[in-house]
Amino acid sequence: MKRLLSIELQKIWKNKASRVLTLTYFILLTFIALIASIKFDLGIFKFHLAEMGIFNFPFIWHFNTYIAAILKLFLAIVIVSMMANEYSYGTLKQNLIDGMSKKEFIQSKFLTVVLFATVSTIFVFIMSIILGFSFSSYTEFSIIFSDLEYLLAYFIKLVGFFSFCLFLGILVKRSAFALGFLLVWNIIEGIIKGILTFKIFPESNTAASIMQFFPLESMSNLIVEPFTRLSVVKNLGTQIGLDNIKKYDVELSSIIIVLCWTIIFIYLSHRLLKNRDL
Amino acid sequence: MNPLETILSIKNLNKRYGTLQALNNVSFDIQKGNVYGILGPNGSGKSTTLGIVLNVVNKTSGEYNWFGGTMETHEALKKVGAIIERPNFYPYITAKENLELVCKIKGINYAKVNEKLELVGLVDRQNSKFSTFSLGMKQRLAIASALLNDPEILILDEPTNGLDPQGIHQIRDIIKQIAAKGTTILLASHLLDEVEKVCTHVLVLRKGKILYTGLVDGMSANDGFFELQADDIENLITVVKIHPAVKNVVKGDGKVLVYLKDTLEAKDLNRFLFEKNVVLNHLVKRKNSLEEQFLELTKNL
């Protein structure tokens, strides 16, 4: 396992584009902290985002993992190109000839995906702890370490999404087209969602319960948007008469669905690799 | 050296690409210590055969096994050095780092990297990125990479393809050096003189079928033929036909080609004709080159 990872990391780290993107990703992650400095001062109306409670434990877990997940696209590019490059450089062929098995090849890529997800999760954890201690109104031990399932959800979300990217890289063999495919897939899911929600099953939950099985939708269901959960926004909602019945918890069903997709993507990647002539 | 140690054994290998039968019942064995050439025109199935045994192309049916079938293909490949068509390395990392990556894949230490770079004459450029190399240098790096593990067998697929004469010469020299050390080599090529110069055994492939397997010498070891010329060609032909060792006589280009069924030395033929009052302007005994043999073998299909 160590051997496979070290092979893969050497391939990625020596590549300038991948290195820059990876670094950018982690630097941008730290910029979440900058949200704390957003302040508006409009005379009588003073607005300081950090004091709105977004960095309160345990809400910060939800908020930070949601924001951090947006940045995953940077690593997605790295992962798609890490796979597609092997095809365009012909190095996949050479790796196999040099004595790597197809299974080991997929393993090394998947291990990298898991490593990226793990490092991101640890990074977000540390950053949230620091931000939380700086701004949170509550710093009791039991409160800090409640709602940690958002970190688990974040981890699974990244692994699932990156596995999807890996699969697309193998399927399409070209980085740009694979990323294009990802975008198109996103649009397709959006269109299906629109049709199901507004045309076929209006005024029922059937659409949502079908949509939850789609790969990207299931990944986004893992961490529901946190904004409407903020007390300020909530109050605003009740004032204009909206009853907020939304659930913000990490659902076990979403975790299982995303894990299933991860297994499917990795299995299909291996099958594609096995059956394709190079 | 144990001459019967089989490195690679292929039995009834078939490969189909859709309706195209790329390989048709190909069987052969590679014994340790020999230099094999796979000859065949483009598209005859050379690369497909190598691709299958190197785990990059899936077979349709048939069997092959490495080193007597004692290990899985990908494990066996760690003891094999192979270059397929064009050199494939990561363009953004240096020659040395590329070789180190191959070491990691093969599970060996970096000890041999420098030695092999020296062998192919790339020590000076070891810290240059692969993308800055010329095709000849890339191909030499590929050979260095294939030799990293001191392989039991070296497989080369069209190693001189696309190189300039100097590059071709360098690669051939390296191959000869390696062969001289007793490494088994399997060389696929459509260049006949390349095979003739380097190989001891040859395997001729056409449209996915094996036409000939055996020694290179065996392939061109016919009784040869004579090229004759005289002032009176018609008379020459009638006289030469009388000789018992002559199979047939062909006239062409102002010369007479005499094919034999038994061995016949030039001096004996000369004496025979002189005794019959035929005086020759020109007498050469020739053997078919591998090229002519090859064309002979492949044209009847």
Image (cartoon, coloured by chain):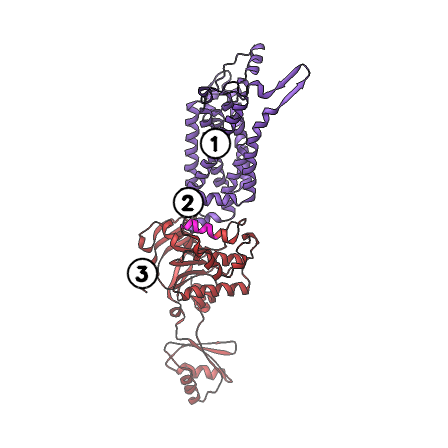
Chain colours: A purple, B red
Quadrant of the image occupied by residue B272: bottom left
Please state the extent of the stretch shown in magenta in the rendering: B99-107
**Chain ID, mark 1:** A
Quick check: do tags 1 and 3 share a chain?
no
- Amino acid type, label 1: Ile
Q: Nearer the viewer, mark 3 or mark 2?
A: 2
Residue identified by numbered label 2? A3
Q: Does A240 appear above or below A174?
A: above
- Amino acid type, label 2: Arg
Side of A97 relative to A130 (left or right)? left
**Chain ID, mark 3:** B
The rendered magenta stretch, by its main secondary structure, is classed as helix
Q: Does B261 appear above or below B115?
A: below
Residue identified by numbered label 3? B5
Q: Residues within 10 Å of mark 1 (few under 14, many from 20)?
A: few
Q: Position of residue A203 (x, y in %)?
A: 50, 15
Residue identified by numbered label 1? A122
Q: CA distance from mark 2 to mark 1?
A: 23 Å
Mark 3 in CB contact with mark 2 (< 8 angstroms): no
Q: Is residue B100 magenta?
A: yes
User: Which is nearer the eye, B79 or A150?
Assistant: A150
Q: Nearer the viewer, mark 1 or mark 3?
A: 1
- Amino acid type, label 3: Glu
Q: Nearer the viewer, mark 2 or mark 1?
A: 1
Q: Secondary structure at mark 2?
A: helix
Give the quadrant of the C terminus of chain B. bottom left
